[in-house]
Amino acid sequence: GVGGGGGGGGVGRRGLGANPGRGRGREGGLRRAVERRGPGVYYQPQGELTTSRIVGLEALVRWDHPDRGLLAPGEFLDAADQSGLIVELGRQVLTMGLAELARWRFVPGYEDLELCVNVSAQELLHPDRFALTTDLLRSHQLPPSALTIEVLESVLFDVEGVVQQALMSYVDAGIQLALDDFGTGSSSLVHLRHVPFTTLHTHRARVPWVRASLPHRATFRAPPSPPAPPPP
């Protein structure tokens, strides 16, 4: 669960910079931050256009650097991904996010609030992540549908399909899936055929017919499935 919001949750090369020594120093600082106090988790509200009602929260991770202040994910996620810290970082974000969601759902008017957490390929394929996710949902008495796992489209480009298999485990458990940066890959529509994403995030420039009316990042949600026909 390491997201940046606005498509900023992806892992970029800026995190390490051109200086290997600087990259190692940043990795060490991030490791100490994760071990001592965990990441800073912030929540971006997700609204419903027709009612202006807040229906969800997206968990965003920030690193409160002792010298440079609050750093966006592009400044450190590459180091976290290459070092393997991304798994522990994501575990902490998921744990804190679901605990926060459970508290919010006791507030009148927010009983159906949902949480969206960005997840990397390493997290998806970690042997303990799926069990951790379902255990946390159960311990907080949250329905699986209250959680959305969001992945970048780029993580689906694995030839063997192991990421898609991992995603289907979440679907089978009732957890929702979201696809970020939709439209950046050449096989976008193929992904929609094989994995039942309920939400797509895309940039306004990739949707010409709504450029004038939507903010720079648009979200499209699949309609609910129709009820099953009555038995004969």
Image (cartoon, helix red, strand yellow):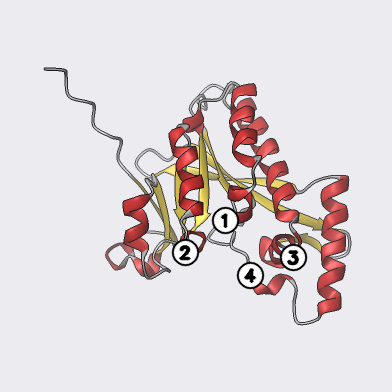
Query: For mark 3, does the 10 Å Cα neighbourhood hold few (<14), some (14 to 19), or many (20 or more) residues?
Result: many
Question: Residue tagged by mark 4?
Answer: 12
Question: Residue tagged by mark 3?
Answer: 79
C-alpha span from label 2 to label 4? 17 Å
Query: For mark 1, does the 10 Å Cα neighbourhood hold few (<14), some (14 to 19), or many (20 or more) residues?
Result: some
Residue 161, image x, y percentages: 46, 56
- Assess whether mark 2 and mark 1 are in contact (beta carbons under 8 angstroms): no
Residue 1, image x, y percentages: 63, 47
Q: In this view, does 55 lie to the left or right of 135?
A: left
Q: Which of 231 and 138 is in front in this view?
A: 231
Q: Residue 25, located in which quarter of the rendered image?
A: bottom right
**32 up-or-down from 95: above or below:** below
C-alpha span from label 3 to label 4? 9 Å
The kind of residue on which mark 3 rests is Ala
The kind of residue on which mark 2 rests is Phe
Q: Nearer the viewer, residue 128 or 100?
A: 128
Q: In this view, does 62 lie to the left or right of 145?
A: right
Which is more foreground, mark 3 or mark 2? 2
Q: Which mark is residue 157?
A: 2
Please identify the quadrant where the C terminus is shown.
top left
The kind of residue on which mark 1 rests is Gly
Q: Determine if residue 213 is in view.
A: no
Which is more foreground, mark 1 or mark 2? 2
**227 up-or-down from 159: above or below:** above
**168 up-or-down from 25: above or below:** above
Q: Which mark is residue 5?
A: 1
